[in-house]
Image: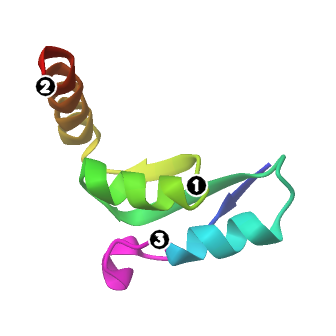
Amino acid sequence: MLVDDGSRLDEQGGGGGAAALVRRTVSPAVKVKAAGGVRTLDSLLAPHELGATRFGATATASILDDLARRLNESATA
């Protein structure tokens, strides 16, 4: 089962606080989706840290490019 947090992250400053509320409210077997404003890796990581495991994002390629760059930088540091 999947529950969308029903929020728009861009209207919440990228915090994804609704994801944390949903995560605390539903069974651990339920997947929580954050969507609306997931345009950067950082805007994906914020609700992930609060319990979201699924994301609606239109900038997937950019997010994955940023992730690859960060992983590469940490591997060479």
Q: Is residue 5 above or below residue 59?
A: below
Distance between the alpha carbons at the discs numbered 3 and 2: 27 Å
- Residue at the disc numbered 2: 73
Q: Residue at x 87, y 57 (%)?
A: 27
Q: Nearer the viewer, mark 1 or mark 2?
A: 2
Quarter residue 50 falls in: bottom right
- Please name the residue that numbered disc 1 is placed on: 52
Secondary structure mainly formed by the magenta segment: loop
Type of residue at label 3? Gly
Question: What residue is drawn where x is 18% and y is 40%?
Answer: 62
Determine which of the numbered discs, if any, sits on residue 10 in the image. Answer: none
According to the image, label 3 marks what residue? Answer: 16
User: Mark 1 vs mark 2: which is more N-terminal?
Assistant: 1
Task: Tell me if residue 20 comes above or below residue 67 in the rendering.
Answer: below
Give coordinates of residue 73: x percent, y percent.
Answer: 13, 25
Tag 2: residue type? Glu
C-alpha separation, residue under disc 1 versus residue under disc 2: 26 Å
Residue shown at 51% from the left, 55% from the top: 49
x and y percentages locating residue 44 in the rendered image: 38, 53
Q: In the displayed structure, does residue 72 sit left or right of residue 1?
A: left
66 left or right, relative to 17: left
Which residue is located at x 76 percent, y 69 percent? 24
